[in-house]
Image (tube, rainbow, N blue to C red):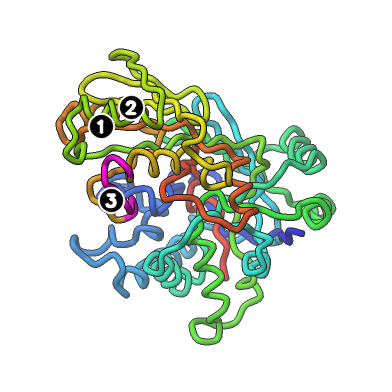
Amino acid sequence: MAIIKPFRALRPQPALAKEVAARPYDVLNSKEAAAEAAGNPNSFYHVSKSEIDLPEGTDIHSEEVYLKAAENLQGLQAAGTLIHEEQPCYYIYKLVMDGRSQTGLVCVSSIDDYNNGIIKKHEFTRPDKELDRINHITHTRAQTGNVFLAYNDVPELNAIIDQWQQHHAPVYDFTADDGISHTIWVINEAATGDQITALFAEKVPATYIADGHHRAASAALVQKATNENIHSSANLNYFLTTIFPASQLAILDYNRLVKDLNGHSKEDFLSQLEYDFIVEPVGHHEQKPSMLHEFSMYLDGTWYRLVAREGTYTADPIGILDVTILQNNVLGKLLGIKDPRTDKRVDFVGGIRGLGELVKRVNSGEMKVAFALYPVTIQQLFDIADSGNVMPPKSTWFEPKLRDGLLTHLI
């Protein structure tokens, strides 16, 4: 069963929360971070993207970047911008985007659970990305990036979290510049915290990584190498997580663009698609897929509806995914894209950008054809993780994203 604990968060003074809060380090580049942090010494980008405070062109994986991150984190504490909670607490984190809300529990989760498969994965990790986070953790002695976990709903846990929100004032409540609102409550009563810990231990057999595989893997690797890298600390046995009940979550589509038709004429390409799909032109208006195994394709100014024919895909947890069907029956079979991780002819666009981004890039001539997919369901993610398999690359896009800097776990 899942082992979680309250922790003493390093967090902003309430009046400074909006200034401190930063988007996750891996969703924007250095120039974008510098622009967002301009004129704001309290921005957490000075910690999570500390290259913005070094000469332009500095290697973002150099030692001086990690040293600067540690220096800046210490500086925010020394200035009183960030304060260290006096006692271990749980935290409730509510996000609202486009009228839809989701509420999770911020805690620290057991690295033993990660190593033993209680915390389940659905993605491969890359050693270079792990090393970046390892260096950041060991230099700052902090886990600044939150791992986004999900679990099957437990009504008793939902009730505790709902009641706390109703009867207590939040410590932070602001709307970021992108329109997403962030509200955080501190659960600072030991009895309520004990209830939460016990319910997870009794009723949550597993949690699932939704977003943050590299952050989780890096925390585990830092713990493993404790004696070599930093002073031993019991906090190293846990890592920073926000855990959401499955009913709260929505996964957005993750769409594909391809530069050319691999030598096919438009007419030949459409004809070849007929073997595996029912193909129906639907006009010039943007067309979102309305169900699993239905795809929308934009080609030469026209949207097409593609429906996978029965018998053209398998029923196993990976084979039944729409990203697998598209890869096997279109990208690989017709367009010659065998490895979407490395092929430069394919690009991926998160659903947060909308179908207009697909139209723009095809109409510009940069890309030839676009495919919009129906989002993976949270149950499909759970099924794949339970089976021990991993999803194809770029399968899921979660929004809204947690902000860095609001709750940090010191090790």
Mostly what secondary structure, the magenta segment?
Answer: loop
When the figure is inspected, residue 407 is found, relative to residue 266, above or below; the finding is below
For the residue carrying disc 1, how many other residues have a C-alpha within 10 Å: few (<14), some (14-19), or many (20+)?
Answer: many
Residue visible at 28% across and 37% down in the picture: 257
Q: Looking at the rendered structure, which numbered label has been put on residue 297? A: 2
For the residue carrying disc 2, how many other residues have a C-alpha within 10 Å: few (<14), some (14-19), or many (20+)?
Answer: many
Residue at disc 2, secondary structure:
strand
Q: Amino acid at mark 3?
A: Ala
Q: Looking at the rendered structure, which numbered label has been put on residue 34? A: 3
Residue at disc 3, secondary structure:
helix
Mark 1 touches mark 2? (CB < 8 Å): yes
Left or right? Give the position of 190 relative to 138.
Answer: right
Is 282 covered by the magenta stretch? Answer: no
Residue 176 location, x and y as percent? 45, 36
For the residue carrying disc 3, how many other residues have a C-alpha within 10 Å: few (<14), some (14-19), or many (20+)?
Answer: some
Residue 185 location, x and y as percent? 66, 43
Left or right? Give the position of 250 relative to 33.
Answer: right
Q: Quadrant of residue 74?
A: bottom left
Residue visible at 80% across and 38% down in the picture: 155
Front disc: 1 or 3: 1
Mark 2 or mark 3, earlier in chain = 3
Residue visible at 78% across and 36% down in the picture: 163
Task: Name the residue beneath numbered marker 1.
Answer: 369
Q: Which residues fall within the magenta stretch? A: 333-341
Q: CA distance from mark 1 to mark 3?
A: 34 Å
